[in-house]
Amino acid sequence: MAGIYIHVPFCAKKCLYCDFFSKTDMSQKSRYIDSLLKEIDDNKDFISGERIDTLYFGGGTPSQLEEDDFRKIFDKLNESFDLSFCSEITIEVNPDDIDKDYLIMLRRFPFNRMSMGIQSFNDKDLKFLNRRHNSEEAVKAVKLAQIYGFKNISIDLIYGLPEQTIELWKKNISKAVSLDVTHISAYHLIYEEGTPLFRLLEAGKIKEVGEETSLDMFRLLISELESNGFRQYEISNFCRPGYHSRHNSSYWSGDPYLGLGPGAHSYNGKIRQCNRPDLKSYISGKGYREKEILSDNDVFNDYILTSVRVMEGMNLSELEKRFGQEKKAYTMNMAKKYIDNGTLEIKDGFLRLTKEGVFISDAIMSDMMYVED
Ligand code: SF4
C-alpha cells in the first residue's frame, strides 16, 4: 500500500510560527499546476506496483485552489494511478476559505476527509499567531462542513503559546470536543528558526511557557480527550474509534509514499526523494529534486523514529524480520533502561511508550537511534 501527498505551496497570509514552504503571491498558481501535472507524469513509477490507499492535499493552503485546479489534478491522477482502492482522500483547509459554495464544489471531488487548521478558539491567540480567521468563523466552518457532507473532520490545535494559561487551554480542548469532530491533532508551539515568532523570542518580546506548564498542558490534553472518547494513537494525534488518519499512519508504518509539489518528500523503501522548497526551480522543472539512497542504518533509524511514536509501538518480530537479530539485540539493549524506569514497556510482542514515556518520547527516540562509529 502507498500514499500520495500533494503540496500546495500557497497561503493567503503567513502565520507567525510557520516554517512550511508556501508563498503568499498566487501569480504563479497556474504554472505550479502545470508543473504538478508534469511531475505526476514523470514520477508515477516511483511507487509502481503499490496499491494507492491514501491521497492527501496539504500545504500551504489547498483551499486556495479552485474547481478548475482540482479538476486538472484529479484528471491527471486518475490517468496515472488506479485510485479505486483509495480509502482516504484528505484536503487541508483554512476555516475562512470555507463557505457553502466552496463546500459544494469540493463535494464534486472524491474528498472524504477534511483537516482544518484552527489552532485555537481564542481570538487573542489567533491574532497573535497571525491567523486569518477568528473563533466564531472556525466554529461556523466546522458546522458548515458537517452540514455539507464532511463527516470525517480533523482539527489542528496549538498549545504552549506565550501567556496561554491552563484554563484557556482547557477551554480550547472543550470547544474542540463540543464540535463533534472525529480527529484532533494538537502540537506544542515550536520556535522554528527563521520565523517571525523566533525573532520575537530572540528580541525578548515574548517568553516561552515554562516546561512544567507545557507538560501540564499535554497531560490535560490527553486526559480531557480520553475522557471524551478520543484515543491517543500517536504522540500528538487523537481520534474517535476508527477515525485515525490512514495517511499519516502509513508514514509511521514505513509504507511508501509519493510526495508531489515543491518541498514534498517521497519514500519507497530504498530511496528518499526531496523536492527543494523553491517554487521557481519547481516551475522551471530543473534541479528541484534531490535523491538520497538510504543505507541500512538510515532505514533502521527511520523505523525507530516512526514506530516508537505510535502508541501501538514497535512490532518486535517485524523488527527482527526486517533488520535481523543484531539490530533487535541493539534495540532491546537501548530500551532496557527505559523499560526499567517505566517509560517503555513490552506488551503482546510490541515495544511501546508507557503513559509516562509519552512525555519524554523525543529523548527516548533520539537515544535509541543507531549511530555508526
Ligand atoms: S496557513 Fe498553514 S501553511 Fe500557511 S502560513 Fe499558516 S500555518 Fe503555514
Image: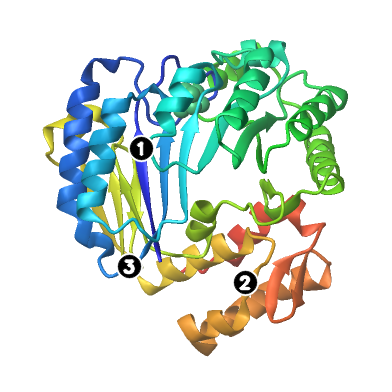
Nearest to the eye among marks 1 and 2: give it: 1
Q: Of marks 1 and 2, which one's residue comes earlier in the chain?
A: 1
Front residue of 335/143: it is 143
Q: Is residue 60 visible?
A: no
Numbered circle sitting on residue 7: 1
Q: Residues within 10 Å of mark 2 (few under 14, many from 20)?
A: many
Check disc 1 and give the amino acid type.
His
| Residue where numbered disc 3 is placed | 50
Quadrant in the rendering for residue 212: top right
Q: Residues within 10 Å of mark 1 (few under 14, many from 20)?
A: many
Numbered circle sitting on residue 314: 2
Question: At which x and y percent is residue 359?
Answer: 76, 50
Instruction: Report the quarter where the N terminus lies.
Output: bottom left
- Local secondary structure at mark 2: strand
Q: Is mark 2 within 8 Å of ligand 1?
A: no
Front residue of 249/15: it is 249
Question: At which x and y percent is residue 304?
Answer: 55, 66
Q: Is residue 208 above or below residue 219?
A: above
